Image (cartoon, grey):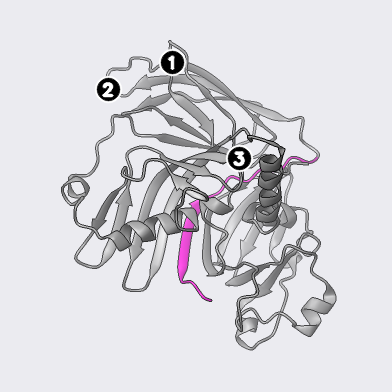
Amino acid sequence: MKVDFIIACFLCLCISSQVIEAQQVVTGIITDALDGNPIPNATIRIANSTTGTYSDESGNYSITKQGTGSFEIIVYHIGYQPMIHVIDTPQSFHQHNVALAIIELPEVIVTARSNYRRRDVNLFWFRILGENPGKNGMEVINPGKPYYYLNKDNMLKVSCGEPAAIVNHQMGYRIRYILQSFQHDYNNNQTQYRGIPYFEELIPQNNREKDRWEKKRKEVYSVSITHFFRALYQEKIHEEGFLLVNGDSLKHRKISPVILSDFLQFEQDMVMANIMYPWVLICFSKPVTAAMIENGVYDIWATDKGFPVVELSPQKIRVYSDGSLTGVLKIKELQNSILGLSSMLPIEYEMK
């Protein structure tokens, strides 16, 4: 099964190993961009995590991110455009003031809200979630909030003035998702979108539900992009169940593993990953042995073996000493979805 699906997203993946004691504190004041008045009760979150706080009556806030590396701060209040700030210079203290602007959707989006079909809605949610929404899986609490616009060139664009509210019943999380951009070209069946989630853990009703959630979390994490980049930073991708191969070699039914030292450049507090050619990442969820590589027992194109396969496009990515990642990650999904919200966990999950 081959899915022609491109995603461009800003990832902030964090692992704490030797630097678990380190932390970064961000403080500032939230104000109205029009009149400069402070905004109380604004939501401040660290992207891709469960860490969050609110501004006080004077608009002041303080939030702490565990570990070093880069991360994103999300500031949101009802009626205002969400603000996302990238912090890519690790240090113990950051000062960041935010002026929120009132939401003003483009007129073309508002007037053309009725210009869409049911299939457009279904496609949008499938791409964002990684599966179809449902009350027992990924339940969308506010499905009517997005604006859909299908233009004459058969290009679907979607915007949303407030975070999408989603409950992941399989893993026990409440998710807020800030959609930055979304477009799908029906002419070539390609989707590009950007968005940032933040999480809140649900309270299990009993131990059975708790165990079911944890089992699913471990299953998802084993093949996740977060897990891969942590293993990449540690140079242990095979031990952690990942195989990175030259995409051209697969065209000839061969498996030619990528040598990590050929594209990883270690510096003082980060590693630069320079992906020079299209490389295919196979996520096995079990250690990759020499026999698996040499014998080529896994023909990823013949049948759906159940493991995810993605293609990494040429790009440069910075990974800091704690495993956090900055840059626009370009991925083409080839087999089984691991890019939607149904396959995402908070960054602190499985921190060592």
- Mark 3 and mark 1 lie on one chain; the one further toward the N terminus is 1
Residue at 55% x, 45% y: name it. 169
- Mark 1 and mark 2 lie on one chain; the one further toward the N terminus is 2
Q: Left or right: where does residue 231 sit relative to residue 77?
A: right
Q: Position of residue 34 (x, y in %)?
A: 27, 22
Residue at 81% x, 39% y: name it. 18
Please state the extent of the stretch shown in magenta in the rendering.
1-17
Which kind of residue does numbered mark 3 sit on? Ser
**Dot 3 lies on which element?**
loop
**Dot 2 lies on which element?**
loop
Between the C-alphas of marks 3 and 2, the distance is 30 Å
**Dot 1 lies on which element?**
loop
Residue at 39% x, 46% y: name it. 180
Which kind of residue does numbered mark 2 sit on? Leu
Residue 81 image label: none
Residue denoted by label 2: 34
Between the C-alphas of marks 3 and 1, the distance is 25 Å
Q: In the image as oriented, which residue stretches furthest toward the bottom?
A: 252
Residue at 49% x, 58% y: name it. 131
How many residues crowd around disc 2 within 10 Å: few (fewer than 14), some, or many (20 or more)? few
Q: Is residue 3 magenta?
A: yes
Please identify, in this view, whether the residue under mark 3 or under mark 1 is nearer the observer.
Answer: 1
184 versus 255 height, above or below: above
Q: Position of residue 124 (x, y in %)?
A: 38, 57
Q: Nearer the viewer, residue 107 or 346?
A: 346
Residue 59 image label: 1
Between the C-alphas of marks 1 and 2, the distance is 15 Å
How many residues crowd around disc 3 within 10 Å: few (fewer than 14), some, or many (20 or more)? many
Q: Is residue 323 visible?
A: no
Residue denoted by label 3: 70
Q: Is residue 67 magenta?
A: no
